[in-house]
Image (cartoon, rainbow, N blue to C red):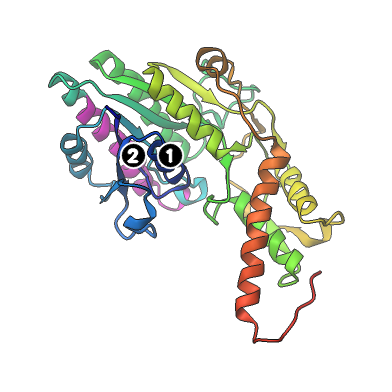
Amino acid sequence: MPHRALITGASGQDGRLLTVALADREWQITGVIGPGSNAAPTDLPGDAEPIAIDLSDVDACASVVETVRPDVIFHLAAVSSVGQSWQDPVHTGQVNAQATAAVLTAARDLVRDGHPVHVVNASSAEIFSGTRTAPQDETTPICPTSPYGVSKAYGHLLAAAFRAQGVSVSNAILYPHESPLRAPHFVTRKITRAVAEIAAGTRTEFALGNLTARRDWGWAPDYVEAMISMADAQADDDFVVATGVSHSVADFAGAAFAAAGITDWHHHVRTDKSLFRPADSIDLVGDSTRLRTTLGWRPTKTFSEVVAAMVEHDMASVDHDVATAQPAGSSRTVA
């Protein structure tokens, strides 16, 4: 019999990738999307069932778990932007912390009712953002520096605590991971879209914040596969999901311009100090030794390949937008 999965955050980057991956494995899927989500029910592949829920409504979170009675819960939904979390810390706490508590409590109730369930909780590298130790692993002290990081730390620690209540939980400590599905408010997608527009000649520059901030960027489909492997193994543990190699924001920009065939790129980028985070870690890079040795996970794309895939997608999108916006017979010059 195929597994029955409940995916919160099914309309986000990871949720969409995970839904496709599980549908290919013939899992039965219920995908939770937020009310007013840009994702239409038809965006979910196969026979996946969409349910719209306000994740700040803890009763609704618990109710969907009780109704679906899944074998595996992939709890991915969150306010996922550090910047947005500073703008609305209260809402961030409701969605990222309280909803996690509601989902875990409902999972515990299923277990007590004789229905085993495994939870894969999407934790975050931001729980380590205040560290001065690099790389970070599962034993690194938790020291978040933003409302987002604090809310994720709460969910991470609570998930571990629920193991004592009989709930099998994997904490997937996800380092930044990208794909063409990355939302446009993330700095990585902001870069690749702007580079595509510069290459198309529709803009000349864009602004970035701290160019020296370093992150461990990976390929999102690889990270989804890591979470699936945790579910398959019923892995009751914490796992850093990371490539082990960090790059600066400037490195990301340079790789994006290179993918677009632009070598002299610095004059296209200006620094805007208003975009700096109130606190930024020096080098956020993960040691995924436990995941690699325990579950055999390996990343499949290099940093340059990840950036290039995003740029290629955005260049095709921009070219399509330009072409459809022009009158018939007109032409444009590509910079």
Q: Nearest to the eye among marks 2 and 1: give it.
A: 1
- Please identify the quadrant where the C terminus is shown: bottom right
Marks 2/1 in contact by CB < 8 Å: the verdict is yes
Say what amino acid the circle numbered 1 marks: Leu
Quarter location, residue 252: top right
Taking 2 as reference, is 314 left or right?
Answer: right
Among the two numbered marks 2 and 1 on one chain, the one whose residue lies closer to the N terminus: 2
Q: Is residue 152 above or below residue 263?
A: above
Instruction: Identify the mark at residue 18; answer none if there is no mark.
Output: 1
Residue at horizontal 65%, vertical 25%? 244
Judge whether residue 274 can be spotted in this image.
no
The spot of residue 75 in percent (x, y) is 35, 35
Front-most of residues 117 and 158: 117
Quarter location, residue 320: bottom right
Residue at horizontal 24%, vertical 15%? 166
Residue 88 painted magenta:
yes
For label 1, the SS is helix
For label 2, the SS is strand
Mark 2 → mark 1, Cα distance in angstroms: 8 Å
Front-most of residues 290 and 116: 116
Residue at horizontal 40%, vertical 33%? 25
Instruction: Please give the range of residues in magenta.
Output: 86-107
